[in-house]
Amino acid sequence: MTSGEKIFLDHGLRGIRGEVEDGFPTVVGKGLPALRKALAKGADLNDSALYALFHLMDGCEDTNIVARKGYSFWKGRYREMLLPLLAITPPFSQEARGLIHETDALFSAEGISPGGAADLLTCTLFLHWAEGYPNHFVNITPE
């Protein structure tokens, strides 16, 4: 049994399987709108992708987080940790970049890996480019 199957049986979270079955609602409803909102505000693709990632992290059932840190962490503290990231808008100020760096360091130190959201960011960028938007390469590591 995979960890995703166990999480489904224990908590009803469908993770990536649910995203696929439902037509990637988090990508379409959160990722693409956030990416395009940031780009429309003049943010570069890097900041726009980070902004989209924060919204994907908030919107998806990330079974990677649940598998590594537990369901109660995902429902509670993880959501609280996302609130400051969701409050910043690109183009990012130096203060916002500091917050991103601090959060990145905290996530690394605590072994918090939003792999499901990262996978959905890849889907977001693919759809963005597939729909004819500029094909730039992006580095999603905070500068």
Image (spheres, helix red, strand yellow):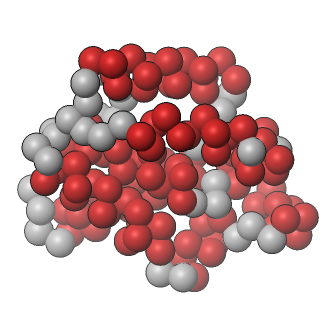
Quarter of the picture containing the N terminus is bottom right
What residue is drawn where x is 64% and y is 39%? 80
Name the residue nearer the viewer: 89 or 142: 89
Q: Is residue 60 left or right of residue 6?
A: left
Q: From what the image shows, is residue 123 above or below residue 93?
A: below
Residue 93 % position (x, y): 25, 24
In this rendering, does residue 19 appear at all?
yes
**Res 125 quadrant in image:** bottom left
The relative height of residue 49 versus residue 98 in the rendered view (above or below) is: below
Q: In the picture provided, is 82 more to the left or to the right than 91?
A: right
In the rendered view, tell whether residue 43 sits above or below residue 92. Answer: below
Q: Can you name the residue that lies furthest to the right here?
A: 10
Instruction: Classify residue 129 by image quadrant.
Output: bottom left
Q: Quadrant of residue 31?
A: bottom left
| Residue 88 image offset from top left, x and y in percent | 36, 37
> Dividing the image into 4 quarters, which one contains the C terminus?
top left
Report whether residue 2 is seen.
no
102 or 17: nearer the viewer: 102
Q: Is residue 72 left or right of residue 90?
A: right
Q: Residue 53: x and y, percent?
A: 42, 47
The residue that appears at 10% across and 43% down in the rendered structure is: 42
Measured as percent of width and height from the top left, residue 82 is found at 55, 40
In percent of the image, x 48 and y 67: which residue is there? 26
Q: Residue at x 38, y 71 (%)?
A: 28
